[in-house]
Amino acid sequence: MTLTEINEKLVEMLPERRMQHSLNVANCAVKLCDIYDCDKEKAYIAGITHDCAKYLNNDQVDYYVKKYNINLDEYEMNNLALSHSIIGSYIAQYEFKINDIEIIDAIRYHTTGKENMSLLEKIIYMADLIEESRNFPNVDLLRNLSYSGKLDEALLISFDNTIKFVIGNKQLIHPRTVSARNYIMRNL
Ligand SMILES: [Fe+2]
Ligand SMILES: [Fe+2]
């Protein structure tokens, strides 16, 4: 699909506010590419599509899981907050016909992160958090770090925040986030 066709699909799949977020993530990711020397076209496509599965209803989730034989783990099962990134990577690949594995993986891991993330995966993960409409305590610290060459420092703080938040809410932590956090910490 062309970018215009993908955009038209996304407008059908996402409420206006989420579409704006997706555009913001794409633009923020492109800005980060300037700093970290990453492929801007890939970053834009990954950014715009990353949340494509965020508003699927249960029937649509079942439909795609069956259609593409998607293997959701025990954390992702019945949890669209986590599974939308996995399901979204399949929609991007097979419905939008995006064949670039780096883009697909950046979509796939944008919620949990993972051990040993690629540069594009890191950029999409951070752009999702710091795009201009985001507003939470410490977002400016994350922006300052991300825009000043300290992407890994920003990621470590983000993973720590996520883990603390999940513990605070007495929810399960996805083990990929723990691995992501430990990996970054060891390598900083
Ligand atoms: Fe998302
Ligand atoms: Fe997002």
Image: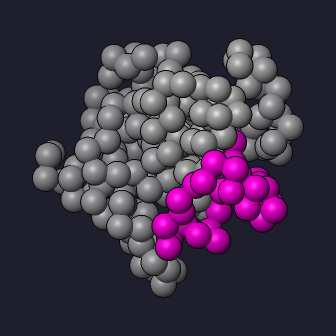
> 147 or 122, which is in the foreground?
122
Q: Residue at x 21, y 53 (%)?
A: 183
Q: Could you say where residue 127 lies in the image, as x and y percent from the top left?
A: 50, 37
* Residue 98 point in image, percent of width and height: 59, 26
At which x and y percent is residue 182? 22, 59
Residue nearer the viewer, 64 or 38: 64
Q: Is residue 43 above or below residue 69?
A: above
Q: Is residue 54 above or below residue 123?
A: below
Check the image and report above or below for 134 versus 35. Answer: below
Residue 29 seen: no
Residue 130 as seen in the image, left or right of residue 117: right
Q: Quadrant of the N terminus?
A: top right
Q: Is residue 152 left or right of residue 173?
A: left
Q: Quadrant of the C terminus?
A: top left
Whether residue 187 is situated above or below residue 157 in the rendered picture: above
- Give the overall secondary structure of the magenta segment: loop
Q: Is residue 175 visible?
A: yes
Q: Is residue 181 magenta?
A: no
Query: Is 49 left, or right, of 20 in this rendering?
Result: left
> What residue sits 52% from the left and 16% below the top?
41
Residue shown at 26% from the left, 44% from the top: 116
Range of magenta residues = 52-80
Which one is in front, 135 or 52?
A: 52
**Position of residue 69 measured from the top left corner of the image (x, y, whole percent):** 60, 54
User: Residue at 79% of width from left, 43% of height from top?
Assistant: 14
